[in-house]
Structures are given as structure tokens and as C-alpha cells.
Amino acid sequence: MEHVVIVGNGIAGVTAARHIRKNSDKKITIISAESEHFFSRTALMYVYMGHMRWQDLKPYEDKFWDKNRIDLVQAYVEKIDSQDQILHMADGQTLNYDTLILATGSVPAKYGWEGQDLEGVQGLVSKQDLELLEKNAPNNEVCPKAVIVGGGLIGVELAEMLYTRKIDVTILVREKGFWSGILPDAEAQLISEHIQSHGIDLRHEEELDKIIADGNGKVKAIITKKGEEIPCNLVGITTGVKPKIDFLEGSGIETDKGILVNKLLETNIQNVYAIGDCAQQREAIDLRKPVEAVWYTGRMMGETVAQTICGTPFEYNPGNWFNSAKFFDIEYQTYGWVFSSRNKKDYEQHFHWKHPDNTKCITIAFHKKSLQFLGINTFGIRMRHEVLDRWLNERKSIDYVLQHLSQANFDPEFYKKYESYIQATYKASKQTA
């Protein structure tokens, strides 16, 4: 019986296992050093905040794995012998495979700062990171002050987590607005102001220089590149993530930033595949980045690779870009492409509307000449994925999108609707253009 071994039990690896089982009787083994069972990584923050328990993060009952004949091994893969198809574990065990799927995810990216390995310096990616945070910042007596280095989605999640335990938080971001490398300036400014409204000390255009120890191996302060010393008990590193690929040295598997794959998610080694955060497309798909550390793309890759392994070769095609997140009390959705002010394409034009309460706005990107709808960002207003996805595929115009915007609204009953205000602003902008 063909033995499929999957290294990593995140959304990518587990989705691959589920779909291989649906389509075959192959022997399946999942290896992970992080946790015994698959869990919902995006919900880690809610355990720390007291909204959920650890056991609530498991989407499947424990009996699911035996019922579906998926063997779970809790171990750390230290080395891969791709010639003889053997995995070597850190505890000395070995495991043979016929087909190997690498779904090892990502780790926090560090940039060689002095003091970055001190006790009290950590990221927020894994279950172990959550456990470490409970140790480093259980309350505001043990940890009265924290500094978060870097913005983005993980940075704002960590800030909200610490905020719920009344820990003073300072965030250092390089840009002039929060996440302005991704968001248009008006949206980045809105999010900056919203974060600051919760008492977070958000420092724009500020970077970490070094981390200072207390003499006992623990962090006591950071120094910014402007020379300011900020005392703190915790330093959260949220300057992005990088693929977990260090264990592949000497394996013969080609890597760059991540594990290089083609559109079938095949590596350069026969019967070895890579999916999820650790995979890097040899040729970028559309305007997407070659490495995408996004939950739903990991799930899609898992489904895709399962089809190929089960005899129906299937190219990875994630379709239109979309994502969602939450910045404290403001929900964010994006569909298609809305580039930041500094990365905006020559042909790209933006229409922006903001509510006076500064908690709701939308930005619609469209082609300057053809007026084709290119993408939309929404803050504080929920939109229907299938409607916007269809409009993108059908290449509707911005005029069509604005005229039919109410069809895409997904806010619950009794929520106030804002389409008429948005349409009026757009009409006024056309008249003054």
C-alpha cells in the first residue's frame, strides 16, 4: 500500500490528508512536533483572551483520526533522505515514505537584532508561542509593559490580546500609517487612529535598533533607531513570517525563500510536494506573491495536491485574491486587488468613502481608462464573497458595482446600510472630476 507522509498538521496538511482519504485507500501519516491534533490557528488569540479553551480549537473530535485511518505521529523531522525516502526524527526514529507532502508552515522572521534571543522576546505563530506568552505575560504584574515590533495582522492581534489583560503596549511600525505597505493611506490612517483609541502607544516611522538585557538573560528594554529607550518586560516580534525550511539542508529539495514548486505543487524531487506557508511558486500566479502565508490558500493547496496524488493531476489556481481580518473592533475584508498608495499600479485609480464616525470605510480600485472593477477593501461593512468574486470574474465596471452594491452587503438584519451615502459620494466625485 502506498504510504503518504505529511509533515505538518496545519490547515494545508490536514486538508490534504482528508481529501486523499476521500479519494483513496492509501496509508496516511501526519507528523507534527507542534501539537497532537490539528487546531484552528486563527483562533489562538481567543484562548489567551479567555473567549475559548484550548480544546475548543480542535475542529474534529479525537476519534476522527482513527475513523478515517489517518495516523498521527508527534515528532520533529530533523532530516530528509530523499534518495532512500526516509525521514529522520530528532528523537532517533525513522519513517519511510512513498509520497511526501511538506506542509511545515512558517516561523517568525527575525533580522539579527542584538538581544533577539533573550527571554521575553517572542513571536505569535505556534501553539508553543501561545504557551510562552502565558509564561511571559500572564498579567500586568508580571508584565506591566510590552513592545511590539512590526504591525500587520499578527501585530494587531497581539496588541489586542495584551490589551485585554491591561498590559501597556507600544507598537513600532516603519510606515507613516498602520500596515500602509498594504493599505491605501486613508485606510492605514483610519486603522492607526482606531488602534490608538484603545490606549495603544502606536509609534509611526519608528524601528527597533536593539533589545537590552537585565543581566539575567531577560529583556528589560528596547532601543529605537532614534535612540529612545523604552522599558518593557515583553518584546513581540511581528515583522512577518518566513517558511520553515531549515531542516531541508542536504535533502536535495530545492529552496529559495520557500520550497520551490510548480503549479502541480511538485518539488524538484519525484513524489515530494510542498503546500501552504512553506511553498514558493516558481512562477508567481497573477499578481499574487510567490509565497502566501494565508489560511485559505493553504486549504486550497491541500485540496489541489490530493487530486494529483490520487491520479487526477490538478494545477493550483486560487482564483481572485481575498482575505479578511479584524483590527480590534473593525472587521476588514478585501477582494481583488487594491494596492497601497506607494504600490498602486499606473492604471489603477481609487474611489474612497469614509463614514464620519471613523470606523467604516470602503476603497474601490478600478482601471483608469476602461473603468473595470479591480478590487475592494471594506472596513466595518461586511460584503458577500460570492457576489464580489462574480463581479471580478465578469469584469464589471465600477459604475455597475456602485449601482448594485446593496446586493453584496452581508451585514445582519437591523444593521444600518450605507450604500446610498457611498453612491452619493461617488456621484459627486464624478461630477467634480
Image (cartoon, helix red, strand yellow):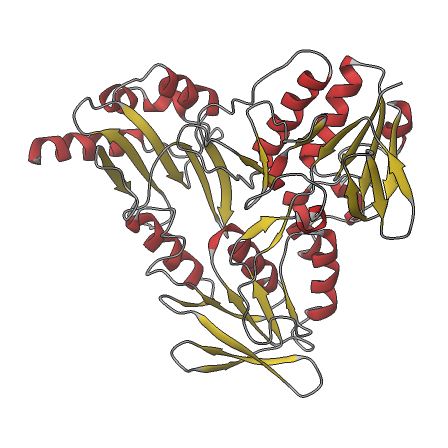
Q: Residue furthest top?
A: 312
Position of the N terminus by quadrant: top right
Question: In the image shown, does 181 or 277 lie closer to the viewer?
Answer: 277
Q: Is residue 255 above or below residue 225?
A: above
Query: x, y (%) of residue 397?
Result: 25, 20
Going by the image, does 256 lie left or right of 127? left
Q: Residue at x 71, y 12 (%)?
A: 311
Q: Is residue 119 above or below residue 129?
A: below
Q: Give residue 193's quadrant in the image.
A: bottom left
In this figure, what is the number of numbered marks?
0
Q: Is residue 402 above or below residue 422?
A: above
Question: In the image shown, does 324 or 280 lie closer to the viewer?
Answer: 280
Query: x, y (%) of residue 403?
Result: 26, 21
Q: Residue at x 60, y 42 (%)?
A: 255
Q: Residue at x 83, y 30 (%)?
A: 97
Going by the image, does 139 lie left or right of 368? right
Question: In the image shown, does 365 or 344 lie closer to the viewer?
Answer: 344
Position of the C terminus by quadrant: top left
Going by the image, does 427 lie left or right of 27? left
Question: In the image shown, does 272 or 21 lie closer to the viewer?
Answer: 272
Q: Residue furthest left?
A: 432
Query: x, y (%) of residue 28?
Result: 84, 26
Q: Give residue 252's quadrant in the image.
A: top right
Query: x, y (%) of residue 147?
Result: 54, 70
